[in-house]
Image (tube, rainbow, N blue to C red):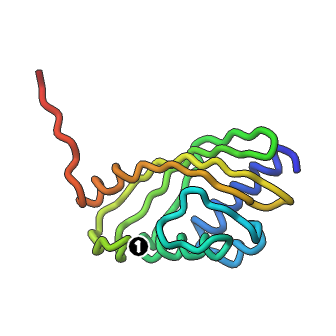
Amino acid sequence: MSVEENKALVRRVYEEIHNKGNFAAVDELVAINFIDHNAPPEISPGPEGIKQTFTMFRNAFPDLNVTVEDMIAEGDKVVARITLRGTHKGEFMGIAPTGKQIKLATIDIVRIAGGKIAERWGVGDNLGMMEQLGVIPAPTHTEK
């Protein structure tokens, strides 16, 4: 696949799976031996793990939406800087619904093989999300 085709595939994952909640697309877009190097605890490997992860997020943030801010590709890898937004209306990793909105900045590196997503490495601002949910206090700034 070309670099542009790889980018289109990753954009489709964000649109179909993240934004629309179309988990049937996982089987079409994700390799059977998919590895998420940064999966949440106790998530199954492969495409089933993606379905579990996004079911967890969708149940907690039913209005979840992903915006692709930047996308860079080279060879078989695509790097995306994305922003997730949603309202905390369901239990999330043991945290009762707060009704608060989150804005989570994330960087994903995705490897494509055989026209499907084969691997993912991701880094998100989880600390910032916990602050936004009120689980931990935001740092205070003092004037000097």
Residue found 23% across the figure and 59% down from its top: 134
Asked if 116 appears above or below 43 in the picture, the reply is above
- State the residue in front, 3 or 16: 3
Secondary structure beneath disc 1? helix
Residue 57, position in %: x, y?
47, 70
Residue found 62% across the figure and 60% down from its top: 36
Residue found 60% across the figure and 49% down from its top: 108
Identify the residue position indicated by label 1 in the image.
60
Residue 19, position in %: x, y?
58, 65
Residue 52, position in %: x, y?
55, 76
Asked if 33 appears above or below 142 in the picture, the reply is below
- State the residue in front, 63 or 120: 120
Amino acid type at image mark 1: Ala
Answer with left or right where residue 83 lies relative to residue 28.
Answer: left
Answer with left or right where residue 17 lies relative to residue 27.
Answer: left
- Quarter residue 69 falls in: top right
Answer with left or right where residue 73 lies relative to residue 81.
Answer: right
How many numbered dots are placed on residues in this image?
1
Asked if 125 appears above or below 39 in the picture, the reply is above
Quarter of the rendering occupied by the C terminus: top left
- State the residue in front, 102 or 34: 34
Residue found 70% across the figure and 78% down from its top: 24
Q: How crowded is mark 1: few (under 14 residues within 10 Å), some or many (20 or more)?
A: many
Residue 13, position in %: x, y?
68, 62
